[in-house]
Image (spheres, rainbow, N blue to C red):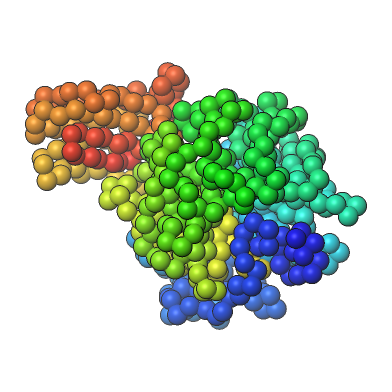
Amino acid sequence: MLYESTERYPHRGVRDFNYFGDPALEVAGTSSRRWKSNGLVADNLPIEGPVYAAVDGIAGEGTIPGPASGGDSFPQRDDDPTVWWKTGDIDDANVAGALLEAADGSIYAGVDQYSEAHSWVGTVFRSVNGGATWEQTGDLPYCRSVTCLTRTGAATLIAGGLAYADGQFYSVIYRSIDGGDSWTIVFSLPNGMVLDVITTAAGEVWASTGWDGAVYGSANDGIDWELAAWFGMGVHVHCLLETSTQRLFAGLGGEAGYKIMWTDDGFTWNHTFGTAVLTEVHDIVESCGGLFAGVHGFGGAEDIYVADLDGISWSSSELPDYDTFMIRALCTSPGCRVFAAGERIGGKSTVSVYEWNAQYDEWFEFGGVIDPIQRVHALLATSDAVYAATGDNYGKIYKHILPPAASVPNPPNQIDNRGFRIRHVNPARDGVELRCSLPQPSPLTVKFYDPTGRLLRTLCHDAMFEVGSHTLIWDGRDEAGLAVPAGMYTYVVHAGESNSIGRVVLIR
């Protein structure tokens, strides 16, 4: 099968054949939607740099003048429903399959590029200007595909994927201690492919593989690796997640009997419930006390599954677009925002990104369609943008710009139809005072979450409060008593049957 993907069809990437869908699906044309991307035809590449092309004469901020721009430049608005913009070009890119933000704000992308000598080569690119331009990092020896990226607390970069040498394919992990300027191989095994790498709160690095269905762990910054779990041949371990409770989850596919597994010690794995109709689980994230899984299932199965933080029992969550075939990628952002994207049915030439609105308990289309793209392989949310990495023989990376943290307004009184009210100052220095007004005695639960949606601190849990005004103070520390850095944080307040979700900017 790997031979089929790289030799018989050299114009396609290995992932479309082995792990990511039907290679027969072609881009059938372009959508009649308002926004389109410029220069996505291989023999008609645009000029260097980002080009934001509007079909009906309205272009995005920073548009390069010329025939593709279609008109004058206008600033992007966060409430504009058509705002996916293409970042700078990466030459000969076929699939952009991994995204990572470094501590200094740089964006790294794992990209599969066409190569006349080897059909495909796996590379890592870096952008220091929000995707306006990309530069290639150091060479990854023998690499054919980069599927996943992570960084450790020591600022080490870890990349996983597929290598090829002497007629043999290998699952491979690379390590860089100089920001990607040079990479060394630290792990390789014949056959299969590394599908995900993550770093835990304790600093351990975990990796999962496809076809041989294994999970490996490293306790020394990705230098040495040992087998932690094996789920069987023919199994793809697509994704790993460590939750804020230190429970580790694995999303499986292929011939796995259970599609979501969990462990508290890294070695004894347990199955979950409610996922019998699923065939693949591509990604899992945590947000504001819940888990979200991007999946593919048998007929009638939804593309998103959700669970409480314990992750034992899962159920479907309906998307607004029934043409969505599967969800490949998820990411989180402050405000209990979860973004999801994947692939649409029947060769349609557009794809949508969806946003979970926790206040309404519902999914909405986010940012309009990305056109003409069928597949999103990875999503990344930073403090000011959401990035989407795509395939379809183009390997483009798109972004939707979010409002800066400093623009989060001082919220008005939040009052529901039961008279429950909550107020606070925004931004807040060193800590936050939440002033709650209760129309009747109520059990109160107040929780704060970090920018990725992971639980930081519980101020109270089902504590009874009397009618009237109450002040609850978060001192800007986590459950361990450690001060959290400046940034945007989310609070969730449950007062009986009333709920409130808000964001606060913490400054130091």
* Residue 249 image point, x, y percent: 53, 37
Towards the viewer: 361 or 447: 361
* Residue 400 image point, x, y percent: 47, 58
Towards the viewer: 301 or 424: 301
* Residue at screen point 53% across, 33% down: 270
Residue 68 vs 484, above or below: the answer is below
- The single residue placed furthest to the top in the displayed view is 481
* Residue at screen point 43% across, 76% down: 33
Towards the viewer: 42 or 311: 311
Q: Is residue 449 visible?
A: yes
Residue 461 vs 288, above or below: the answer is above
* Residue 236 image point, x, y percent: 64, 48
Say whether residue 186 is left or right of residue 72: right
* Residue at screen point 60% across, 46% down: 256
* Residue 502 image point, x, y percent: 30, 41
Say whether residue 312 is left or right of residue 396: left
Image quadrant holding the C terminus, namely: top left
Say whether residue 281 is left or right of residue 410: right
- The single residue placed furthest to the right in the displayed view is 166
Say whether residue 319 is left or right of residue 37: left
Q: Is residue 387 visible?
A: no
Towards the viewer: 168 or 87: 168
Q: Quadrant of residue 3?
A: bottom right
* Residue at screen point 9% across, 31% down: 440
